[in-house]
Amino acid sequence: MKKVIKIVLMVLAIVAVGGIIGVFTLGPRLVEESVNSFVTAQAPSVATEVESLHERLFIADLHADSLLWGRNLLERADYGHVDVPRLIEANVALQVFSVFTKVPRARSYDRTEADSDLVTWFTLIQRWPLASWSSLTERALYQARQLADAAERSGGRLTLIRSVADLKRHLQRRDRDSNVTAGILAIEGLHAIEANLENLDLLYRAGYRMIGLTHHFDNAVAGSAHGVEKGGLTELGKQAVARMEALSIIVDLAHASPQAIEETLDIATRPVVVSHTGVAATCPGPRNLTDQQVQRIAETGGVIGIGYFEAAICGLEPDDFAKAVRHIVDLVGIDHVGLGSDFDGAVRTKFDVTGLPYITESLLEAGFTDQEIEQIMGGNVLRLLDELLPRDG
């Protein structure tokens, strides 16, 4: 009997160890496969003229959350939406990589409490540095290092953009070789500074060049469109906007409450972005922009990134995306709209990044000219970055 008990205990120990190893190795993948899905894995089949146009575009996307999931972005994956090989295949010249530092367990577009956090789980099972287990700022710094490390290991396929000088060098390289792409670091929510304005400078030095005021919950800086209070800018928030502008960090109003959007626009002296959103005129929803908000953002010279996910465009088809773009263009002109996919942001889409030719096709079918499509697909973002990034640094 003692021998049997000993064998049973050994088996249970092996199962337990195997379970722990499985959590650490397969946990992030299983989660991502369930939340970052897409409908079709087939390569886009578009007309020759669409393919030709797509191949000569400068394509820039304002928002993807790929850094959270622990994938090696230099290797092609068959799940998730974005990695470097797929970006290059899709002819994406520039991808904004945004990071999560805190995400409540029970999220609602209408009302989300800030009293829980799923990212802590990721810090543990992906073996992030000990300091990141409890510090939101450290989580942002760690993910910045991850992207910088990927760029360094990429053999030139991925460049990290921190300045206009970096951007111009990347453009020159793209003229010679289209098999390269670039990334810009962004953050979802200024809770990442932990209510300490000095941490903005720390994040700037780490390479962050775009930061959203809020994510799914109210924070010490501003109210969220999905928060409890949904208030405006706090005094710290007003100081943070001013400091971001002084540092040449782009202010992102995605997920901000209506009051926070209005109060930010009241004090902004530079163009702002809404990195991933929809418009209420074509898709009503708590985070989608009203016509008045679109007009005020355009007045700053800003750009609005339209997402491909259902909450943004009330569908998953490229035509749904084109309808939102058409509304913005008819309202404020061609200069203020771009791509804001929200790829890898716990969303379901029609396609992964390699499906972008479908977007080009939908814009052509919606009656946009080649020149207008060039602006929508990346030209407007390129203009904005040339204006807002630090010149060198």
Image (cartoon, helix red, strand yellow):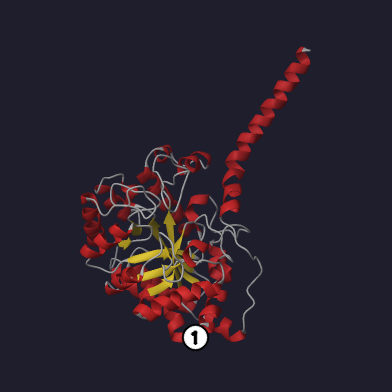
Q: Residue at x 36, y 68 (%)?
A: 290
Residue 40 appears left or right of 250 = right
One can see residue 62 in this view: yes
The answer to whether residue 318 is above or below residue 207 is below
Q: Amino acid at mark 1?
A: Gly
Judge by depth and name the residue closer to the eye, 314 or 213: 314
One can see residue 248 in this view: no
Q: Position of residue 154 (x, y in %)?
A: 51, 61
Q: Residue at x 32, y 52 (%)?
A: 230
The quadrant in which residue 5 appears is top right
Judge by depth and name the residue closer to the eye, 328 or 59: 328
The answer to whether residue 13 is above or below residue 334 is above
Q: Position of residue 361 (x, y in %)?
A: 55, 80
Residue 239 appears left or right of 23 = left
Q: Residue at x 61, y 58 (%)?
A: 77
Check disc 1: other Cα within 10 Å, few if <14, some if 14-19, many if 20+: few
Q: Position of residue 37 (x, y in %)?
A: 59, 58
Q: Residue at x 39, y 59 (%)?
A: 185
**Which residue is tagged 1?**
367
Q: Position of residue 380 (x, y in %)?
A: 38, 76
- Which quadrant of the figure contains the C terminus? bottom left
The answer to whether residue 297 is above or below residue 26 is below
The residue positioned farthest toward the top in the image shown:
2
Q: Secondary structure at mark 1?
A: loop
The answer to whether residue 8 is above or below residue 337 is above
Q: How many marks?
A: 1
- Which quadrant of the figure contains the N terminus? top right
